[in-house]
């Protein structure tokens, strides 16, 4: 095995920024924001020895329809968030290459909303549950510090909704755009004394850019706050998401994509309608009904704090897929219709104390996180007689239960110019499957994973405007429930599958140029053993195995600057080498990991009138080419660069506030692949992105 060394020459680079120190005071201003990701308590991002970025409410809300988190996450280095133009399968989000293999939903990256996981105990999450209309900020944590959040490897994406405040107000928003995009959102908020409320409801509709990709999504959100004293606070939240019969356009082959990026894959076995696509013949679609609630209690005792969060919910999914063997289906085939009903709940309790120790300040957090999900899962044939796309005979019936119990601790000691951090989390993850459909064999089984994830970090304050840091951790990524269902031998539940274990290293610097500009830079390396790859795919079942070691090495650079006269600029650059460090099977050593671009870039240059009444900006998004399978022999999705333009305006008239925006995305009408389906057995890897498209929005808010 080749040895690769990550050279971390950041101290020299940081010293080059020494002249940036403009005063003897701690840097202040909007670029030195307070975050909670990484330490689970308020902490300035500038003094945290980790790569963390914050997307504020203006970036999320002001010039976007707020349909997908990818709208805002594009500006974060190290993160790739792809809108698949497929609302049946959700976004693809990867952090430093982790999560790129996910065929649906988000894995390898932990999602959290208002302290409540949007990621299930097995590591599978859904970004569609994020309520972007009420978002105050999104924090994105990458690298070693994310190990303290448990079962994932790449990072943490955490959304915080705004707190209700001020006199009662009501607001209505409407947006429309290309391909029949329509979104309506109404909300109300207010506070009086110790009580506050925030209510929101929205509907999103689209005909879809790709053939057979129409969707309708209804979301609702409620937040109630109560502060019985100056040192305690209770927050209640409830949310729901409903998508009925969301069409799934599926992936296509390279030949089909070149012929027509909007088109679906023709079903060559359909003799009655030779031009009908697979998606049309099987009417591929998914219905989702997701409901959850949460309660959070916080009490402060001087500098100390107790926080308890509990949550629960239900998720119901019915999905109609495109594969079927008709009456020739083998016994192992679990059908082309997936139907599951999931109940989930959990609790996270932690105690934070602050003490003076050895001439410095010690901050300690001790906590316990418990989570459980239980699925009643069935599979059916997707045909009845000659009719496809309907629920047929039962082919699968089982109960799946996943539970986790994770105690954790984190210490931070600060003295003078030094900040030392250490932490540890002990994770236990248990899977149980009870098979009730025994005519094709008994797939019952269980597996229990236990892993300890340690973390160390150090930050040195070179000057009030320049910090350098380094951190290291050992993380793990357990298989999801779907990856555990089958073994390559056809024997059922794959209890021999192990978690992938990675060693994370990071070093970087953070520099403030007065109050107007900030630069963050980081180099990182992750060595992973036991990477999960596809073992076999046949008879309607996909199985996985632990393969060879992998290596991820890269760098991130971000710049935020206020240039004066209302002008501003933002840059986010990522360079990532992600390869198999050892060969296996037909995959040679050095092959690039699929789904991961070598380079990613986001750039923005904007202007806003001093009072904020008018604004405009140009954006560019670029990504390198991406392979779709492990051997790197199939045609990769080519790299691309697009340019977007946006304008905005606002007016205040008494108690009324009006806002308008317009966007022109992909101004030069580039044709490109927006995302790939990694390892598709039929080589239908490619999902096209839209050409030139527009969206416009208006809002009106009245405060009583």
Image: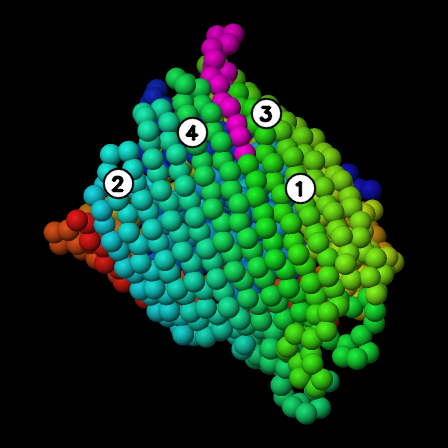
Residue at 62% over, 50% down:
124
What is the CA distance from the residue labelled 2 to the residue labelled 4?
19 Å
Q: Main secondary structure of the magenta part?
A: strand
Establish if 514 lies above or below 546. Answer: above
Q: Which mark is residue 191?
A: 2
| Disc 1 crowd, CA 10 A, few/some/many (<14, 14-19, 20+) | many
Identify the magenta region. Answer: 348-363
Q: Is residue 213 in the magenta section?
A: no
Q: Which residue is mark 4?
A: 298
Q: Which residue is mark 1?
A: 403
Q: Which residue is mark 3?
A: 409
Q: Earlier in the sequence, mark 1 or mark 4?
A: 4
Given contact means CB atoms under 8 Å apart, are the residues at marks 3 and 4 in contact?
no
Q: Position of residue 46 (x, y in %)?
A: 44, 31
Q: Nearer the viewer, residue 591 or 403?
A: 403
What is the CA distance from the residue labelled 3 to the residue labelled 4?
18 Å
Q: Nearer the viewer, residue 420 or 210?
A: 210
Given contact means CB atoms under 8 Å apart, are the residues at marks 1 and 4 in contact?
no
């Amino acid at each position: 095995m080749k040895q690769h060394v990550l050279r971390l020459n950041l101290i020299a680079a940081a010293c080059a920024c020494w002249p940036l120190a403009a005063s003897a005071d701690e840097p202040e201003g909007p670029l030195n924001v307070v975050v909670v990701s990484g330490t689970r308590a308020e902490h300035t991002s500038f003094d945290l020895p980790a790569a963390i970025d914050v997307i504020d409410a203006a970036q999320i809300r002001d010039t976007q329809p707020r349909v997908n988190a990818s709208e805002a996450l594009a500006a974060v280095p190290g993160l790739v968030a792809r809108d698949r133009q497929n609302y049946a399968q959700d976004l693809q989000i990867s952090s430093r290459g982790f999560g790129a293999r996910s065929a649906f939903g988000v894995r390898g990256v932990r999602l959290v909303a208002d302290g409540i996981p949007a990621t299930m105990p097995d590591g599978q999450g859904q970004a569609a549950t994020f309520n972007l209309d009420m978002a105050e900020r999104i924090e994105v944590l990458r690298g070693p510090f994310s190990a303290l959040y448990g079962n994932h490897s790449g990072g943490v994406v955490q959304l915080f909704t705004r707190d209700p405040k001020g006199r009662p107000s009501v607001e209505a928003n409407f947006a429309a755009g290309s391909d029949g995009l329509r979104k309506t959102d109404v909300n109300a908020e207010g506070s009086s004394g110790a009580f506050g409320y925030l209510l929101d409801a929205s509907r999103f509709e689209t005909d879809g850019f790709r053939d057979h990709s129409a969707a309708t999504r209804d979301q609702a959100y409620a937040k109630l706050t109560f502060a019985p004293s100056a040192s305690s606070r209770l927050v209640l939240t409830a949310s729901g998401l409903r998508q009925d019969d969301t069409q799934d356009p599926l992936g296509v082959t390279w030949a089909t994509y070149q012929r027509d990026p909007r088109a679906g894959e023709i079903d060559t076995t359909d003799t009655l309608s030779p031009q009908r696509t697979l998606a049309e013949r099987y009417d591929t679609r998914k219905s989702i009904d997701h409901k959850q609630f949460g309660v959070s209690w916080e009490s402060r005792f001087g500098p100390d704090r107790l926080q308890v969060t509990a949550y629960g919910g239900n998720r119901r999914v019915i999905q109609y897929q495109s594969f079927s063997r008709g009456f020739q289906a083998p016994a192992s085939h679990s059908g082309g219709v997936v139907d599951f009903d999931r109940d989930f709940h959990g609790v996270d309790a932690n105690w934070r104390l602050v003490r003076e120790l050895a001439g410095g300040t010690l901050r300690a957090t001790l906590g316990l996180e418990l989570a459980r999900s239980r699925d009643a899962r069935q599979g059916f044939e997707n045909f009845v007689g000659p009719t496809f796309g309907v629920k047929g005979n039962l082919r699968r019936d089982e109960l799946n239960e996943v539970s986790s119990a994770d105690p954790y601790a984190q210490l931070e000691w600060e003295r003078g110019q030094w900040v030392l951090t250490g932490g540890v989390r002990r994770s236990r993850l248990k899977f149980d499957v009870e098979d009730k459909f025994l005519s094709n064999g008994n797939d019952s089984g269980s597996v229990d994973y236990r892993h300890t994830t340690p973390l160390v970090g150090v930050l040195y304050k070179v000057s009030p405007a320049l910090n350098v840091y380094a951190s290291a951790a050992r993380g793990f990524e357990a298989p999801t429930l779907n990856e555990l269902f089958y073994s390559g031998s056809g024997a059922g539940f794959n209890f021999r599958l192990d978690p992938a274990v990675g060693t994370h290293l990071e070093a970087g610097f953070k520099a403030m140029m007065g109050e107007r500009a900030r630069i963050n830079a980081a180099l990182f390396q992750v060595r992973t053993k036991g990477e999960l790859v596809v073992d076999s795919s046949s008879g309607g079942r996909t199985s996985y195995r632990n393969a060879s070691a992998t290596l991820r090495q890269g760098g991130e650079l971000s710049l935020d600057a206020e240039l004066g006269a209302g002008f501003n600029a933002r840059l986010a650059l990522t360079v990532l080498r992600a390869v198999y460090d050892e060969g296996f099977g037909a995959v040679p050593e050095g092959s690039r990991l699929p789904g991961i671009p070598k380079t990613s870039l986001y750039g923005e240059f904007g202007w806003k009138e001093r009072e904020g009444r008018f604004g405009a900006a140009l954006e560019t998004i670029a990504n390198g080419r991406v392979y779709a399978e492990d051997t790197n022999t199939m045609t990769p999705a080519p790299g691309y660069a697009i340019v977007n333009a946006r304008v905005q305006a606002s007016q205040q008239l008494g108690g009324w506030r009006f806002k308008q925006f317009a966007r022109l995305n992909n101004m030069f009408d580039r044709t490109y692949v927006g995302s790939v389906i990694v390892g598709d057995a039929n080589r239908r890897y490619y999902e096209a992105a839209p050409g030139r498209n527009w969206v416009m929005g208006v809002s009106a808010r009245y405060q009583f």
